[in-house]
Amino acid sequence: MPERNRPIQKPAQRFEEIADEALVAMKARAEELKIQGVAMAAHVPGKTTDSWSSKMVVVGSFKKGCSPKDPGMNVLAVAYAKAAEMADTFQASGSGVRPPMKGEFGWQGGLVKKGKSGYLITAFSGGTGEEDVKVSQAGLDILAAVL
């Protein structure tokens, strides 16, 4: 459909489409790094976190290190804890701008950027902090180019 005939989309509608592209890029980057975990992307409309839209994808598995003696780690929960920290600080997760609150870990792996219609958040959990940042950057680049 020609651009002039396309219906005007609200930022949340546009986010849904672009988030899929961002998650594909994050999954590809995680696979390049040979890590498994969870990638998530979120859009916070406006200047404060009163609501958000988010999407996620599992890359391999969202549970790590499970054994009879160790319940393991739920990296899905960790990815969203990173995002929750960023929703409050609008700084990368683990930035140390304040001590972690209960429910947060202060771990690296999430990135945030002010976009045209609010804040863009990406997070990955499953690798080292440095690897998680690389995966998150792949998604944030796509979100920021459009939103």
Image: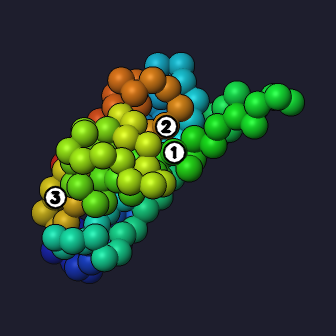
Q: In the rendered view, how is the structure colored?
A: rainbow
Q: Residue at x 63, y 43 (%)?
A: 74
Say if mark 1 contacts mark 3, CB within 8 Å.
no
Decide if residue 128 is in sight here: yes
In the image, which is nearer the foreground, mark 2 or mark 1? 1
**What's under tag 3, amino acid-wise?**
Gly
The disc, 1 or 3, on the residue closer to the chain's N-terminal end is 1
Q: Which image quarter: residue 114? A: bottom left
Label of residue 115 in the image: 3
Q: Which residue is mark 2?
A: 125
Near-viewer residue (92 or 28): 92
Circle nearer the N terminus (2, 1):
1
Spatial CA span between label 2 and label 1: 6 Å
Q: Secondary structure at mark 2?
A: strand
Q: Secondary structure at mark 1?
A: helix
Q: Give the percent coordinates (x, y) of residue 106.
A: 37, 41
Mark 3 residue crowding within 10 angstroms, few (<14) / some (14–19) / many (20+): some
